[in-house]
Image (spheres, helix red, strand yellow):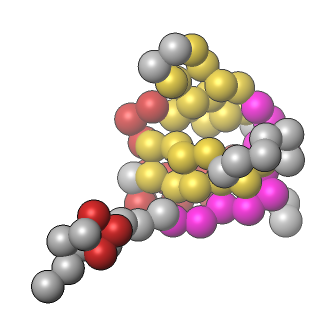
Amino acid sequence: MAVETADLQSELEEKGELMLAVSEFDEPLEMHLHDTDIEDGIIRIHLTDGVLTFDVDEVVAVWHHTHSLADFGLED
């Protein structure tokens, strides 16, 4: 799956947060509009203890992550 920088930026702006599978990491990454920079094919996620940097080319999947009331044990 080839991810284009402009498409990824547009989807992040539309949804506010996205999940990513990145080839060099075992766990999915969560990126938010307020803590992510995407520029010149590079993604930078600003974390509480540093900045995670990787190439857009390393992204193998993108999906919108949502939460439900059931996730928090609040369903009726």
Q: Quadrant of the C terminus?
A: bottom left
Work out whether residue 4 can be spotted.
no
Question: Is 27 situated above or below 55?
Answer: below
40 left or right of 35 in image: right
Residue 28 image offset from top left, x and y in percent: 66, 51
Q: Quadrant of the N terminus?
A: bottom right
- Point 34% across, 68% down: residue: 71
Q: Is residue 62 magenta?
A: yes
Residue 70: percent from left, percent from top: 30, 75
Residue 35 against residue 75 in the figure, above or below:
above
Residue 62 falls in which quadrant of the image?
Answer: bottom right
Single out the residue that lies furthest toward the top: 49
Q: Is residue 16 visible from the viewing direction of this image?
A: yes
Q: In the image, is 74 to the left or to the right of 6? A: left
Count all numbered tags in the image, as a single digit.
0
Please name whichever residue, 53 or 74, is drawn nearer the observer in this view of the structure.
74
Residue 69 among magenta residues: no
Tell me residue 72's x, y (percent): 27, 64
Residue at x 73%, y 62% (from the top left corner): 61
Extreme residue toward the front, this view: 73
Q: Is residue 23 left or right of residue 50?
A: right
Viewer-closest of 61 and 8: 61
Q: Which residues are magenta?
A: 54-64
